[in-house]
Image (tube, rainbow, N blue to C red):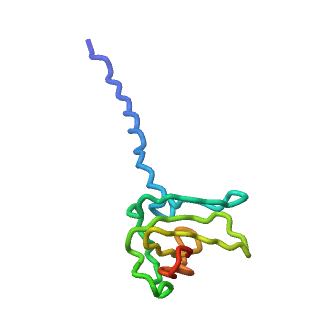
Amino acid sequence: SRPPPLSVSPSPPPPPFDSPQPAPGSSCEAATSFGDAPSNPFSLDIPSTAIGVGPDNYVGSLCPNSAFTGTGSVYWLKLNDVRPGVALDLTACGFDTDLSIFKGSCDNLEMVACDGDSGSCNV
């Protein structure tokens, strides 16, 4: 008697690897969005800036009164609703804050302004 034919089935592919989501504010792609509500009030307590890294194209000459070099800890924010003629007033008190403004997409950022130590809580 002959042995029965051997049947081989392919193994199912392994499940896809789910990488952890980046922490909010840790990169341009994971920036915390604001400015998309009709009245645009926004308040954010940032417990740590040690989660993010600055962009490769930081332009220190735009921020002459700052010790920040673009390579230290950062927290990314993204303004969603930019309209001509609307002022943006940011208040950052209680710690040394440097604000860098970029335009463009995350893969093509251009630094356009910076405020390192203007002397007040508003930057």
When asked about the image quadrant of residue 42, the answer is bottom right
Residue at (71% x, 59% y) in the render: 39
Residue 26 picture location, percent across and down: 44, 61
Q: Is residue 123 above or below residue 40?
A: below
Q: Nearer the viewer, residue 62 or 88?
A: 88
Task: Specify the quadrant that holds the C terminus.
Answer: bottom right
Q: Residue at x 71, y 72 (%)?
A: 86
> In this image, 31 relative to 14: left or right?
right
The image shows residue 24 at horizontal and vertical percentages of 48, 56
Q: Position of residue 64 (x, y in %)?
A: 46, 87
Decide which of 71, 64 is in the foreground and name it: 64
Q: Residue drawn at (43%, 82%), measured in percent from left and top?
A: 66
Q: Quadrant of the N terminus?
A: top left
Q: Is residue 79 left or right of residue 16?
A: right
Seen in the picture, residue 6 relative to 14 is either above or below; the reply is: above
Residue 38's place in the image compared with 60, above or below, is: above
Depicted 3 relative to depicted 13: above or below: above
Number of marks in picture: 0
Front residue of this view, candidates 37 and 94: 94
- Rendered location of residue 59, percent (x, y): 47, 83
In the picture, residue 2 is in which quadrant?
A: top left
